[in-house]
Each structure stands twice: as structure tokens, then as C-alpha cells.
Image: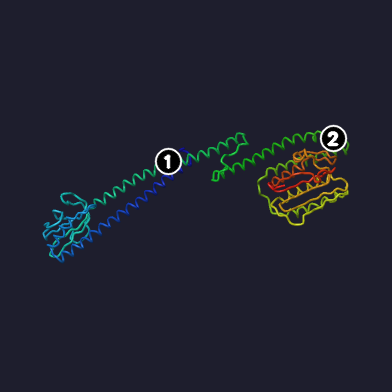
Amino acid sequence: MLRSTFARLAALVAVLVSLAATAIFLIAYFAFAFVSDQALRQLVDTDAAGLVDIYAIEGETGLRRSLQDRLALRPLEGEGPVYLLADPDGEPLAGNMTKWPEAFSLDASWVHGTFTVDGERLPLLGRAYLMPEDYRLFVGRSTTSQAEALARLRTIFTAGFLLTLTLGIAAGLVAASWIMRRVERLNRTCHAVRDGAIDQRAPGAEGTDEFGLLSRNINAMLDRIERLISAQRDVSDLTAHELRTPLIRIDRTLAEAADDPARVEEAREQVAELGELINSLMDISAISAEIGDTRGLEMLDLASLARSITPLYNDVAAEKGASVKLDAPRPVMMRGSPAQLGRLIANLVDNAVKFLPEGGEVKLIVREGPVLIVEDNGPGVPPDWRERVFMRFARISHGGPRGHGLGLSFVHAVVRRHGLTIEVEDARPGAARPGARFIVRPAGDPA
């Protein structure tokens, strides 16, 4: 906990909250002290002004009577007034002070100190005035209530400060503990993946907070890593299996070649074929690893791309008396890789042309969606092969040219990379030669 960044952050927040509370208290404390002091001063000034008026009208006798009356009417709450009327020699004449203190200045300046009132030492705030005929008058108020109020305010603040600090630390520790538990769950997932459990995923991905977003990002990263590892494993296994026969054949050809240039040339062709096989496997693995990665994609017209590819296969189809027709009347815009989508179209059309009968036909249809359909009137794809046909090295024996079985696997990888799906069905159900219809459409679209 002490090494945790979250715990230190919680402590910092608690300190900042405490400092803020302290600042608020100091502002409130000094504001209250200032306001109460000003209220006392105003009360003294008002009281003194009234007494001065009484002295001017009724003289010393009236002033003494007024002082006695005011002292007799002590307030139920708060501090009572403090008065002292003295003759020119400083001898007390009226009031609740028995002696004129030497500290009292007669220039009406404020007096603030502790003096004896009714036999009790009290803190006072007041003014001493020099009246006509040199009479002396002191008017003041005790500051005991003000001091007690400020003391209570300090006590309340101290308790509030301690409560705020305690709650702040407790809340911070609870929050830090909660965050640490969630981070620890993510760490356990990372440790499990590091130790080889590549199928593990970060919990809490369904959450809508920052940890939910972090979990989703981690899981997306792990999904891609798993695809990369799976692609690498598949390439390694399939390559080892599929390359064994070509290598044996090349070895036998070279052994029998001796001085026969034709056999040497045949071996070279087999080596080139092997190189194409390896390149195709690498292309499929690279595209599979890019699933979910939108980098390198751009806006393109799928219909225009199809129009540029279709003529390339007309000559090949014409050798069989067949044809390749395009139905793409309007632009179909989508975001994708022109090179990969171009090879997708070429592979589907090439695959259809290979198995066309004499006088057959391939139709290439492009519609909004995007939807890409390639159909032919060849032998079709048997129902039990419609899933396996997209697997690597899957080859259906229809008597046509025999390839490596990677063309449709490449198509499947490109489709997934672009967030699409591909399905195969009979072009003419129930016919002797049902043909095949390959349909590429966005994932989730109804058939």
C-alpha cells in the first residue's frame, strides 16, 4: 500500500483537502473576528454619542442618572456595558468601575485591555472622552463573549479538521484499495498471458468507466496477439506439411536430371512454384494479422476496381468459349485496401473461370452495401465443402487445374480484414451443374 501510487495520491488528496479546510477556517475566523469587533466599536460609538447628548442637555446630574439607569437594565444575553464618569481629578462619580485607570487616554482613541469592573478583571474595548468642564467619561464593552465565540469557533474547526482529515484518509484508502484491486486483476491477466495462457482476457470489459475502456483495449490487443500467434502456428504447421511433397519431388527431379536440361528446367519450375506457395502463405498470414487494424485503408470505388479486373479474364474464358460479365452500373464506395480487394476479386473470378465448362459464364455483380457476388455455371461446391473450402490447402477434385488450395483462403483473410463475410451457395439449385455463387457482404447483414 505504501508503495502504491494510488495510496500516495489518496494521501495527497487528503492533505490538499485539509489545507483547503484550514484556509476556509482562517478566512471565516478572521472575518468573524473583524465583524464582531466592528459591531462592538459601533455599539460603543452609538452609546457614547447618546451620553454626550444627554450631558449637553441635562449636565452632569442628568448624565449620572442616565448611567445608573443603563447599568440597571443589563441585557439577558451577552455582555453588559461598562461606564465610568469621573470628575476633573479622576475621582469616580458614576459607573461600574471604581477607579479611573491611568491607561485611559482622553483623546477618544480606542482602549483595548483588561481592567477591573465590579471587582472582576474583564477584557474591555472602549473609548475615554474629555467632557466640558473637564469631566471624564469612559464607555466600553467587555470582549469576553467575543473571545468565547472565537474559542468555540476554533474548537469546532479543530474537530471538523480532524474529522475531515480522518474521512479524507479513510475515503482515499478505500478508493486506493478499490483501484488497486482492479489494477491487480489486470496484472494477473497480463502475468497469465506472459506465462503462456494466451486465451486469458482482462475482466471488466463490460464497464463504462476508464477501467472498462482499458480492459477492452487490452483484450483487443490480446486478440490480435492471439491471431498473430495462431497465424504463425498455422503457417508453420501447414508449411511443414505442404512443403514436404514439393521438396521430395524437387530432390527426385534433380537426382534424375544428371545432364538432362529438360529435367533441370522442370526442377527450376518446381522451385518457382514452391516460392509462390511460400509467398501466398506469408500474404495470408500478414492479412490475418491485420484484422481489426484500419491503417492503410482508403476510400475506393469497388465497382471501378471490378471493371479494371474483369477484362483480364475475358481472354482466358474465351479459350473455352466462355465469358465473364460484369454488372456494376453505379459506384460503390467503401473503405479498404485496393491491392487486397483487387486480389480478392481476381481470385474469385479466376477460381470460377478454372472450372467453367465449354460455353460457360461467370457473372460479377457489385451492389451497394458493399455486396460483391461472383457466380458461375460450373460444377459448384458440394454442401459438405462450403465451410472447408476456405481453409488453407483445401482442394476439391472437379477435374480442373490443381492448385495449392490457397486462393479462397486468401479471399477469406481479406474479407475478415475488411469486416466482411463470405458465403457460398448453389447458383442454380437442383440443376445438374448447379454452379457456385460466392457472396461477399458486410458482417451482420441479413442474407
Residue 23, percent across and down? 37, 50
Image quarter for residue 106? bottom left
Q: Is residue 37 above or below residue 242?
A: below
Check disc 1 and report its element: helix, strand or loop: helix
Q: In this view, does 230 lie above or below 121?
A: above
Observer-nearest of 317 and 269: 317
Q: Badges 2 and 1: C-beta atoms under 8 Å apart?
A: no
Observer-nearest of 183 and 265: 183
Image quarter for residue 132? bottom left
Residue 14, percent across and down? 42, 44
Q: Which amino acid does label 1 sit on?
A: Ala
Residue 79, percent across and down? 22, 53
Q: Nearer the viewer, mark 2 or mark 1?
A: 1
Q: Looking at the image, which residue sits at the far bottom?
A: 57
Q: Which amino acid does label 2 sit on?
A: Thr
For residue 170, the mark is 1
Give the class, few, some or many, for how many residues have Cα within 10 Å of label 1's Cα (few <14, many ≥20). some
Residue 89, percent across and down? 11, 59
Rounded to the nearest angstrom, the CA distance separating label 2 from label 1 is 81 Å
Identify the residue under disc 2.
Answer: 253
The number of discs equals 2
Q: Is residue 383 left or right of residue 111?
A: right
Check disc 2 and report its element: helix, strand or loop: helix
